Amino acid sequence: MTDSRGPIAAQSAFKSAFRPSALTFSDFMAALGGVYEHSPWVAEALWPDAPSKAFDTPGALAKAMRAAVNAAPKDQRLELIRAHPELAGKAAIAGEMADASKREQAGAGLDQCSPEEYQAFQDLNGAYNEKFGFPFIIAVKGLGRAEILDAFRARLDNAPEAEFDEAIAQIHRIAGFRIEALFAPSPA
């Protein structure tokens, strides 16, 4: 992309209008409270430093939110995991998921499962919840149904502590995608 001012100037015509430091507390919470599924406490932990512009880049915001989650007690992190819906599960069918989760699952085609795929998800959801006590979490962006089902089956063999850590890592990936979307450039 070029214009009379050169390629860098032309690229800067597309900027993110999203600046957490410019937000009021209620706007900050409205924008960031859902980055981590049904867990506004993550964004709330960052609020005291928000006016300093410390979180005005996607990388800095993601790093700070990850740190807030990782510093939380294990029982609070377990609540965070349990706040996520099952893949192609009852919440999806009933339309009870957060909008971001609906878009993410639809993007992976989970709203278009064949009857056999749907049954496989139901069976795996049940086995996974029985073994680990929380729903299977995977960042579905860029994955298809077959890849998700393969990962589901493979991770059922994990030890509980390893799967807890993997669930948190996947939640951080999901949050990263959501943060990138907030900062996505829009025409100036």
Image (cartoon, rainbow, N blue to C red):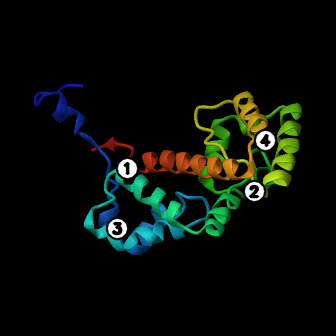
| Mark toward the start of the polypeptide (3 vs 2) | 3
Label 1 or label 3, whichever comes before in sequence order: 3
Is the residue 145 above or below the residue 62 in the image? above
- Residue 156 is marked as 4
Residue tagged by mark 2?
134
- Camera-near label (4 vs 1) is 4
**Pointer 2 or 1: first along the chain:** 1
Q: Secondary structure at mark 4?
A: loop
Between label 4 and label 2, give the one nearer the viewer.
Answer: 4
Circle 2: residue type: Phe
Element on which disc 3 rests: loop
Q: Residue at x 75, y 53 (%)?
A: 135
The CA distance from mark 4 to mark 2 is 12 Å
Q: Secondary structure at mark 1?
A: helix
At a point 67% along the width and 42% down the height, the residue shown is 105
Front label number (3 vs 4): 4
Give coordinates of residue 117: x percent, y percent. Answer: 83, 33
**For residue 63, what is the image quadrant?**
bottom left
Indicate the amino acid at tag 1.
Pro
Please name the residue that numbered disc 3 is placed on: 23
| Circle 1 residue | 58
In primary-sequence order, the first of circles 3 and 4 is 3
**Residue 13: x and y, percent?**
23, 39
Q: Residues within 10 Å of mark 3 (few under 14, many from 20)?
A: some
**Contact, mark 3 vs mark 2 (Cβ under 8 Å):** no
Q: Quadrant of residue 22?
A: bottom left
Looking at the image, residue 76 sits to the left or right of residue 66; the answer is: right
